[in-house]
Image (cartoon, grey):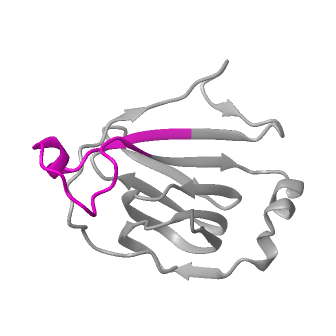
Amino acid sequence: MSPRHGPGARSTRLTRRHRHTHSRHARDPAGARRRHVEVRCTTAATAAGAGAVDAPPAAATVAVAVERRPAAVRLSELGLRSWPKWGGPPGRYALSYGARQTCYVVRGRLSATVEGSPDGAIQFGAGDLVVFARGTRCTWHIVSAVDMHYAFDPS
């Protein structure tokens, strides 16, 4: 994976909101469970009333969605077999996503802690499809060695 590392030039204040339907976890039409975590970002310049030219919008929504064990049909529709592969040893990694990234975990177990989120770590592992929205800043804690497929969406 090649997301940009390190802190950006902006500071963020993040809050979390869960989206619920009829159960604790939302379900997509194929029946796979999804967990949505939405956070709001504001730049320090916007909060202070100063206008920064290259700053993102003040209320950009950033989300991390985990889809547990998606159907093979869904993975085929995404074109998973053509995605690049990445593997990582146990450890901690600070990540910042400049583009939307979708990951399918083939092997291993890890958690992601979104910067400033009061929710704590989001757990996922083998068989999970995870989407990190553009602008998400988090720390990955890889518990057991990970192999995954990934794709970046430039939008």
In the rendered view, does 8 fall on the left or right side of 95? left
* Residue 139 on image: x %, y %: 36, 62
114 or 100, which lies in front? 100
Please say whether residue 51 is one of the residues in the magenta stretch: yes
Residue at the outermost top position:
22
Residue at the outermost right position:
73
Residue at 39% from the left image edge and 41% from the top image edge:
39
| Count of picture labels | 0
* Residue 62 on image: x %, y %: 44, 48
Quadrant of the frame with the C terminus? bottom right
Please say whether residue 79 is one of the residues in the magenta stretch: no
> In the image, is residue 68 above or below residue 6?
above
In the rendered view, does 18 fall on the left or right side of 78? left
Residue at 41% from the left image edge and 56% from the top image edge:
136
Residue at 30% from the left image edge and 44% from the top image edge:
58
Which residues lie in the magenta part? 36-61
Residue at 32% from the left image edge and 36% from the top image edge:
15
65 or 125, which lies in front? 65
* Residue 30 on image: x %, y %: 84, 40
In the rendered view, does 149 fall on the left or right side of 18? right
> In the image, is residue 40 above or below residue 125?
above
**Residue 26 lies in quadrant:** top right
> In the image, is residue 75 above or below residue 61?
below
* Residue 83 on image: x %, y %: 72, 77
